[in-house]
Image (cartoon, grey):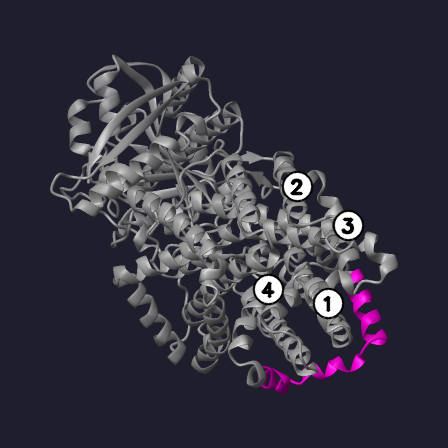
Amino acid sequence: MDEIEEGSSNNSLRRVGTGSSDRRWVDGSEVDSQTPPFSEICRDRDYSFGNLRRRLMKKPKRADSLDVEAMEIAGSHGHSLKDLSLLGTVGIAFQTLGVVYGDMGTSPLYVFSDVFSKVPIRTEVDVLGALSLVIYTIAVIPLAKYVFVVLKANDNGEGGTFALYSLICRYAKVNKLPNQQPADEQISSFRLKLPTPELERALGIKEALETKGYLKTLLLLLVLMGTSMIIGDGILTPAMSVMSAMSGLQGEVEGFGTNALVMSSIVILVALFSIQRFGTGKVGFLFAPVLALWFFSLGAIGIYNLLKYDITVIRALNPFYIILFFKKNSKQAWSALGGCVLCITGAEAMFADLGHFSVRSIQMAFTCVVFPCLLLAYMGQAAYLTKHPDASARIFYDSVPASLFWPVFVIATLAAMIASQAMISATFSCVKQAMALGCFPRLKIIHTSKKRMGQIYIPVINWFLMIMCILVVSIFRSTTHIANAYGIAEVGVMMVSTVLVTLVMLLIWQTNLFLAICFPLIFGSVETIYLLAVLTKILEGGWVPLVFATFFLTVMYIWNYGSVLKYQSEVRERISMDFMRELGSTLGTIRIPGIGLLYNELVQGIPSIFGQFLLTLPAIHSTIIFVCIKYVPVPVVPQEERFLFRRVCPKDYHMFRCIARYGYKDVRKEDSRVFEQLLIESLEKFLRCEALEDALESTLNDFDPDRVSVASDTYTDDLMAPLIHRAKRSEPEQEFDSEVLPSSSVGSSMEEDPALEYELAALREATDSGLTYLLAHGDVRAKKNSIFLKKLVINYFYAFLRRNCRAGAANLTVPHMNILQAGMTYMV
């Protein structure tokens, strides 16, 4: 991954003594004073003197305010969707055809051929029953479930399993991922209003999730399982789509047998994965027109077949034919049900790709184009089968008029490649989100577009998918066998989404209990039936997605487990502030001009690796900044709210903490020089804001010395002055509103502040001397008395992943001469 994205949001955080004996400097590692954050300082020095004075006098309990700020992103708690005009929505809906619906749109290539490989056609009941199954499968899952319910459970316009998980994490403290502190767990944006039965139920669920560790683990495993199955789809979709498109040549070109089908499919797959490094943006403008032409072809051919062969197949709209189908074929019908699942492959993409579009556009495209065209296509094929029951093996191409075969074949091949492209891109996005949330080893990510942050390329994943696709095609050698493997992954992802959306309905939406129960009861029951049907095909190839999902699930959980243990060790072994005071401002060594950026995962306290640098290096930089990259459970953090600053230790130590906040969809891509410039500018703003706060404090004491007592020799952290304008106050204005501090006195105090000028001059001198990146390399080893399984996981599996993942230095595009590394081993 690349560097930190720009941002310039900073916070000043100090503590004002009240004459008590507790006058020591408190860093986040020793937070014991707890006051609500000073949530707003208006722009242009428009401060309320009375409000400030009231905050200086009152000291109720609170969590560390910098950490609270680090988790509160403006606008992160809303669920507003993208508002577009009707014309704009139509334009976006057209684009969704090429990205969202490619997989589902190519399903007519293979659905009936797979269904009737299990149930031979003997009477029209077989055809009408299978058609009725397909119609109602599409109507119930993609239309009723996704279009009308699931799409609304988005995370500020983002969809997918990780988006649902982050949404739940913001309303209940269930996050088990790394980069957490105890103060993080005090943050909850679970905002409820009226005492209703739904509220009581939601609070009960929230409390159960927060207090029971096994429920947190189960929720995380569920999310990782869904993500693993999506990655498995990234392997099966290209193999299935490309082979289905190429199979049309078997009955049209003489001598084009199975070997030729396999070889041609492999050639196209190699070409498809080889062009991934160029990015989808360069050919993306072709996707929507090609898929629009494909859907038009499906609808037109379907109407042609209906009118020419048997328009009475519309009788399949009567679900009674499903009962007749199962009554007639019994066990064979149950096996054929697994083939019907293939008609909704790609339905999860409607939700997973939501971040690139809007809810209305996806709904419009499906209801107005995709759904009617698919129904016409399947009805047309069913009409053809009533007259040609022996054509089920090549039903799609046989039902195409002879004069249109080659144009349709070209369009089908392009549509299959586009469907594969969409799934490959979705796999890249899933892996990136998992990496951002600490659930996947660090890999190299290449951003292929300067305009669209979602267009990325992960070389290792790309070549892994290609090799797996080639193996699947070479081993199975037919679309029927691959179809057996295809359905399990699809149904698994859908069931995970059903569970998570049900939790959202109960916890966040506070839906009426009857409606909340109906959702999993109806859709969960249908998906369970389909899952049982596809599980019967495990020995016929259904084991493939289970193996892939198990492999990725194991990798992600081991990485998460090891990362959490490593982070907990860093928290446990951080350096105490008493020890820092004993060292003095020289830190027990020589301070030389320059700035040291020490990257670590702690949002509070001084990391133990800093002690290693003090012991190892003959001198240390005059200015030290502890940089923490913190991922928060929102899709994107606004650039102006990226950075938070605070001072660590007294002023003469020249030590600061910087928290850079990122959402799981944010792109960390920026030149190191730009990042350094932004960092220094943000630090200067922080120092000026801190000086302004001191001036306010001093003037307040002069104005009313009997009301507030300030200890001059203390360094504290209760008063916080954000540098950005906040949209809300932590508590309403009450007393002293009429007492306003004259801005002229504050301004003159700042202009004459020699301490500020000295510190700014020292910062400029350090900047001119250069910046050095101090990187920590921490190893984790299990203790000798640990159980065998823990030793195996930590000492071998997790250690192997850490050795072979992308190193921390590789994530920063800075000259190697500017990097210093120190190692440390943690026993867990």
Which quadrant holds residue 101? bottom right
Q: Which residue is mark 4?
A: 342
Q: Mark 2 or mark 1, which has the lower sequence index?
A: 2
Task: Please tell me whether mark 2 or mark 4 is closer to you in this view.
Answer: 4
Q: Please name whichever residue, 545 or 729, is drawn nearer the observer in this view of the structure.
A: 545
Q: Mark 2 or mark 3, which has the lower sequence index?
A: 3
Task: Please tell me whether mark 2 or mark 1 is closer to you in this view.
Answer: 1
Label 3 to label 4: alpha-carbon separation: 29 Å
Residue 628 placement (x, y as % from top left): 37, 36
Q: Which residue is mark 3?
A: 254
Q: Is residue 52 visible?
A: no
Q: Could you tell whether 77 is left or right of 782 in the image? A: right
Q: Which residue is mark 2?
A: 280
Element under label 4? Answer: helix
The stretch in magenta equals: 296-325
Amino acid type for the residue under numbered disc 2: Thr
Task: Please tell me whether mark 3 or mark 4 is closer to you in this view.
Answer: 3
Label 2 to label 3: alpha-carbon separation: 35 Å
Q: Which residue is mark 1?
A: 391
Q: Mark 1 or mark 3, which has the lower sequence index?
A: 3
Element under label 3? Answer: loop
